[in-house]
Amino acid sequence: MFWYQIFSDGVEYEARAGKPFVPPDITIKQVWEAVPKHLFKKSTTKSLFYIARHLLITYLFYVFAQNIDLFVASAGGTSLAKQLLKTFCWTGYWGFQGFAFAGLWCIGHDAGHGALSDYGIVNDVIGLILHALVLTPYHAWRFTHRAHHKATQSLERDETFMPFTRKDFKLPDGKVAVRMDYTEILEETPAFTLFRLFVRQFFGFQLYLLHNRKGNRRYPAYTSHYRPNSQLFKPSERPAIILSNISLLVMYSLITLYIKHYGWSHAMRYYFMPWFFQHNWMVMFTYLQHSDPTIPYYRKNEWTFVRGALATVDRPLFGWVGRLLLYNIASDHLAHHFFSTIPFYNLPEVTNAIKPVLGEYYNYDSTGVIAALWRSFTQCVFIEDEGDILFYKNRHGEAITDVDEKVKAKLDGKPVDGAGQEEMIVD
């Protein structure tokens, strides 16, 4: 990608934008038959190798950070140049160690799907440890994430990144609203938009765990992943939630001992700053997987598992870093939604296998990560309160795309013009 394309829309996005949407009629059988059976096989040994490699990389980043001050002191140049070099090195450490922490979370994510080993106990032990290292309640997250996979982009049942509606913002009816109505309610300064983006990127995941921020609003306010009796969980799942909380208490105790021995400044520099950056990377790729102006949400009459799985976007986020440290979680996410138990190291082949079956419904976007994040954050503002297939609208009440008119007419129960058109429309 050339430097001037970093802030441009990808050609794939431009092809989808404005194109009338016809919901897919692809069957799960078609998709499954396209995938070679050997790709479903899991190797505990191979998974443990990747984990060991990742822990080594994480440790080497830590060793690098321990030597930053020595490296800067030995470097030539003015005091200002040394200070700039020091800032650059520490920021680089926080960013890359944040990727490494996010990678620990990604491996734990695969463990939560049972994709690392044929043995459930192996998956759960790995997931519990790796998620505890980055202060994530493994089982609590695993249960709600499983529900997300079962109901992706369903407005009634999905668990994460649930959109605001016209009613939430108390906007006037779309049939009578004018541009000024939207401006008065939704307009904000770029500085405030950046502040909201900062809060969401660095604190959003913990706020979701703490009180279900941006989760499904069918739950009571301040529903928490940390409460065993939360409505997020079945009664039979409560012992696992307690186990997750115990694992976090152990990690908090280890961090406390580290702080007592080395001090708060060490803990902040070596652990907490990378941890904040980890959240930034995680929220970035999870948000962009499902929040895009060209991707639909469905209400119950039109939602199917296949349509939900297809309502996600593959993105080559962070290039080789995303492949090496995030284990294909952004570049092969659509395949993961169809086959959540396939190991991450087989997902690139799965993606290539199902592309011919999915055709135009394979959503890929080469838009640079900063441009894609800003675009989704500023363009994906709300959806309508009514309708079975819905797209995000921006602060002016405008959608970048919409359902094909013939499909919309059928959804509304109106006659469809043109002979033979019924074949183009799914039931």
Image: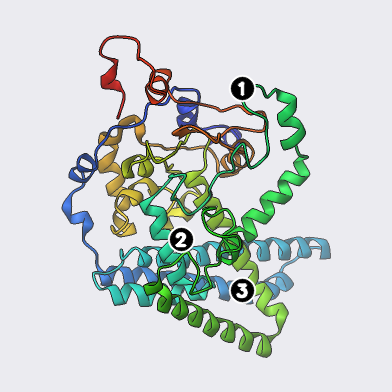
- Lateral position of residue 147 relative to residue 369, left or right: left
Badge 3 amino acid: Tyr
User: In the image, what residue occupies the spot 27% across and 35% down?
Assistant: 26
Determine which residue is flagged by label 3: 271
- Lateral position of residue 410 relative to residue 93, left or right: left
Q: Residues within 10 Å of mark 3 (few under 14, many from 20)?
A: some
Looking at the image, is mark 1 or mark 2 nearer the viewer?
1
Contact between labelled residues 3 and 1, with CB atoms less than 8 Å apart: no
Give whichever of discs 2 and 3 has the lower sequence position.
Answer: 3
How far is mark 1 from mark 3, CA to CA? 52 Å
Position of 417 relative to 310 (above/below): above
**Image-quadrant location for residue 414:** top left
Please indicate, yes or no, whether residue 67 appears anywhere in the rendered image. Answer: no
Badge 2 amino acid: Leu
Determine which residue is flagged by label 2: 325
How far is mark 1 from mark 2, CA to CA? 48 Å
Position of 116 relative to 152 (above/below): below
Q: Which mark is residue 175?
A: 1
Position of 131 relative to 166 (above/below): below
Badge 1 amino acid: Lys
Contact between labelled residues 3 and 2, with CB atoms less than 8 Å apart: no
Give whichever of discs 1 and 3 has the lower sequence position.
Answer: 1
Give whichever of discs 1 and 2 has the lower sequence position.
Answer: 1
Q: Residues within 10 Å of mark 1 (few under 14, many from 20)?
A: few
- Lateral position of residue 330 relative to residue 360, left or right: right
**Image-quadrant location for residue 39:** bottom left
